[in-house]
Image (cartoon, grey):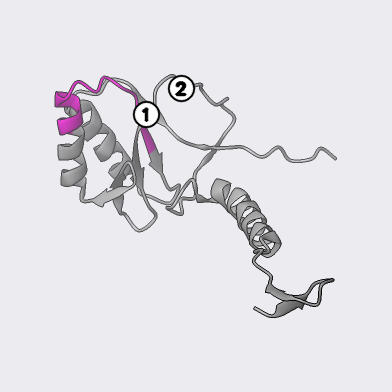
């Protein structure tokens, strides 16, 4: 630090720390995180089928099973085979998870694969099964 002259012609060091640049950087980082956080909700790229049904309100956090376009299976964002997903659901059912299972499948996934997974979900003991879809976009009337 450079010495600063005072009125008495004595030199002393400036011991104050300028925190303004630090505050500026922290505010910019806060804004960046606030903008990007909502975009990070779904990590798997799924092209959902469209529907005219209204969204349902959930009381508890549901169990989400996903099938991607490539045929990959995910149980609450954890990848696995169809057998591993069935085993994971069976473990959840044994723990007493009497919750709704939501199935999120890409619209290009073969129908038979979706039905097979739905059958597995029912077989392990979950009675409440829902489908996650994309709300249909209204087309402008001419």
Q: Mark 1 points at which residue?
A: 62
Residue farthest toward the front in the current orientation of the protein: 8
Residue 64 at x, y percent in the picture = 35, 36
Depicted 10 relative to depicted 122: above or below: below
> Label 1's element?
loop
Residue farthest toward the bottom in the current orientation of the protein: 2
Of residues 56 and 123, which is closer to you in this image?
A: 56
Q: In which quarter of the image is residue 21?
A: bottom right
Q: Mark 2 points at which residue?
A: 58
Q: Residue at x 34, y 24 (%)?
A: 100
Q: Residues within 10 Å of mark 1 (few under 14, many from 20)?
A: some
Q: Which residue is drawn at 61% across and 48% down?
A: 34
Do the residues bearing badges 2 and 1 touch, measured as CB atoms within 8 Å? Answer: yes
Q: Verify whether residue 100 appears in magenta.
A: yes
Q: Which part of the image, by quadrant, shows the N terminus?
A: bottom right
Residue 90 at x, y percent in the picture = 16, 31
Of residues 139 and 64, which is closer to you in this image?
A: 64
Give the left or right position of residue 89, taking residue 114 as reference: left
Q: Which part of the image, by quadrant, shows the C terminus?
A: top right
Depicted 78 relative to depicted 16: above or below: above
Q: Which residue is drawn at 70% across and 60% down?
A: 20
Q: Verify whether residue 56 appears in magenta.
A: no
């Amino acid at each position: 630090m450079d010495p600063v002259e005072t009125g008495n012609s004595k030199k002393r060091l400036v011991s104050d720390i300028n925190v303004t640049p630090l505050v500026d950087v922290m505010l910019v980082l806060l804004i960046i995180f606030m903008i990007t956080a909502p975009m990070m909700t779904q990590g798997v790229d799924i092209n959902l089928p469209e529907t005219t049904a209204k969204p349902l309100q959930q009381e508890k956090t549901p169990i989400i099973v996903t099938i991607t376009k490539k045929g990959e299976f995910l149980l609450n964002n954890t990848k696995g085979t169809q057998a591993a997903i069935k085993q994971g659901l069976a473990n959840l059912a044994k723990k007493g998870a009497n919750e709704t299972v939501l199935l999120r499948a890409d619209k290009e996934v073969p129908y038979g694969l979706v039905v097979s997974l739905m059958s597995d979900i029912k077989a392990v003991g979950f009675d409440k099964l829902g489908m996650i879809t994309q709300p249909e976009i209204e087309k402008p009337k001419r």
